[in-house]
Amino acid sequence: MSQKSQPTAFELAAKPLSDSEIIAMNVMWNRLISVSEEQANALLRVAFGAIVRESGDLSAGVFDAEGRMMTQAVTGTPGHVNTMARSVNAMLEKVPAETLVEGDVLVTNDPWLGAGHVFDFVVVTPVFLKGKIVAYLASTCHIVDIGGLGWSAEGRSVQEEGVLFPVMKLRKAGVVNEDFINIVVANSRVAREARGDIISLMSCNDEGMRRLLDLMAEYRIESLQPLAEFIFARSAAATREAIDLLPEGVYHAEVELDGYDSPIRLKAAMQIGGGVIEVDLDGSSPLAPRGINCPLSYSQAYASFGIKVAVAPHVPNNHASLEAIRITAPPGLIVSAERPAPVTARHVVGQALPDLMLGCLAQAMPGKILAESAGALWVLAISGQEAGAEAPAFASLNVALGGMGARPSSDGLSTTAFPSGVGAVSVEVAESVAPLLYEHKEFAPDSGGAGHWRGGLGQDIRLRALKDQPLTVSAAAFERLRLGAAGRDGGHAGQPGAARITDGQVIDSKGLYIVPPGEALVLRTPGGGGFGAPQTRDPALVDRDLARGMISESAARDLYGHKDR
């Protein structure tokens, strides 16, 4: 079909679609996904912060004129994407669409409107065509430092955690709001990175806007609404069809976390029926006095992800595919924190929710659900003062990764950030942006839970200051130090994590710790749970793991009944 003979989206929506017309719509749909991916890749290329540029701690998406997410980039994290799915409309309630003009850009880091804590900025750019808003481009990324206490769970309120910006204009009719940028820079300990990442968010949306307008010109359309309805109708139908395959009923699960001052209990009651899945998180622990609380929007983001990846992984993630999954909780719980609760390390709770959802689904889908994973990223937030009286302070942000739970048909992935999807900043890059020396980083043998399929391994890390100076380390996200990730269907639990300083200090809570000059920080991240009885594991796989140093001889013998051959 030549470009001149292609029907417009309006024409396609006005009558029943033929096979060729459905193909044409699907081509546009995939082209739109590529716009989101180009948008995300633009952010990866120009971001200043290593946690964005190297780890991919970001999200990007295209929204229709009503603020509904049409497509998301594959690059990015579920917490960012699924909170952003609600952010656009939440921000437009504060700054109505009719007040926007071409060249405007909105921004906020409000945890309850954005991605759950003040470090994540959401930037929204309206796309105008012939004087009308036809779409919005939205993106999110993590700013390393935004003032206050920095990355720490020590805050007693969100006001202590950094500067919070209500929804405002980052750019007004094409002119950058330098007052906003100057406030960000004045409060950040890494001013250059903070400014660069804010500008990068705006730039990646501009790139997405150019790609989108080119796409609309190519297909000779002046509105995305017919395509949006096509996407939403098919996504909703496919999601409901997948849910209808599950046995109706109510399923319950619990997960226990270390918490801060005391353990945290997460509880869920999942009701499946009528083409929808409804989850009530009532019964979870109450609000914590420190910054590990989770706004409901972030809880909804990760809980929805945990359900969708198990029930309808084949359906693209968008407004309609998320509509059939409903997560609720009464206010005042650790999963439904309200202002002004401290929320810096909200991912400790949020990233445990997929395992909670999978615990419910294991009852509805027996034998098809992976074991528990290490869960929350261990955020390595390390700061210090470089040697020399006038040397600036530095703030380094990296992540240490644990093991993924074993799957029903294969071992869990090692040092993989499930459910986050974020990668670690490489040693080479981490050492180039801060005066740190990584002395040791490798797989942690035996850390994955034994099973017919073995849990993914955690990792051993040892690092210290490059020069003779103390380091401040925040253990706000060091989780599963007490209980390892549970196994499934007879699989064993993964090993819990461990953290210490070489001067004898043991890190067993989420406080701030000082690494004295000359000493090192030593970490072992948790492993994933195993799946199925260890005695049934293929002996050839046990031999392979032994040869690669992934398990010890004692584990091979005691857990798997291995005999030398």
Image: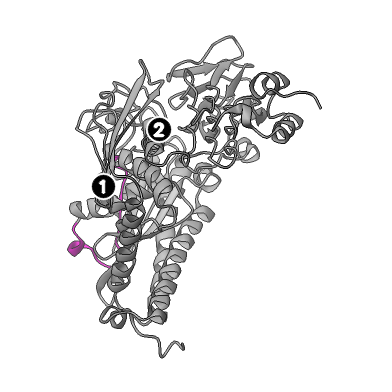
Amino acid of disc 2:
Ala
The residue positioned 47% from the left and 20% from the top of the image is 483
Q: Which mark is residue 352?
A: 2
Quadrant housing residue 510: top left
Q: Name the residue that disc number 1 marks.
A: 273
Q: CA distance from mark 1 to mark 2?
A: 24 Å
State yes or no: residue 102 in magenta. yes
The residue positioned 19% from the left and 51% from the top of the image is 94
Q: Which residues are magenta?
A: 96-111
Q: Callout 1: 10 Å neighbours few (<14), some, many (20+)? A: some
- Residue 292 seen anywhere in this rendered image of the structure: yes
Residue 292: percent from left, percent from top:
35, 27
407 vs 435, nearest the viewer: 407
Quadrant housing residue 227: bottom left
Residue 532: percent from left, percent from top:
55, 32
Verify CB contact (< 8 Å) between mark 1 and mark 2.
Answer: no
State yes or no: residue 392 in magenta. no
Seen in the image, is 357 located left or right of residue 88?
right
* Secondary structure at numbered mark 1: strand
Among the two numbered marks 1 and 2 on one chain, the one whose residue lies closer to the N terminus: 1
Residue 176: percent from left, percent from top:
34, 57
> Looking at the figure, which quarter contains the C terminus?
top right
Q: Please say if 540 is above or below 218.
A: above
- Residue 178 seen anywhere in this rendered image of the structure: no
431 vs 2, nearest the viewer: 2
The residue positioned 42% from the left and 51% from the top of the image is 59
Q: Nearer the viewer, mark 1 or mark 2?
A: 1
Image mark count: 2
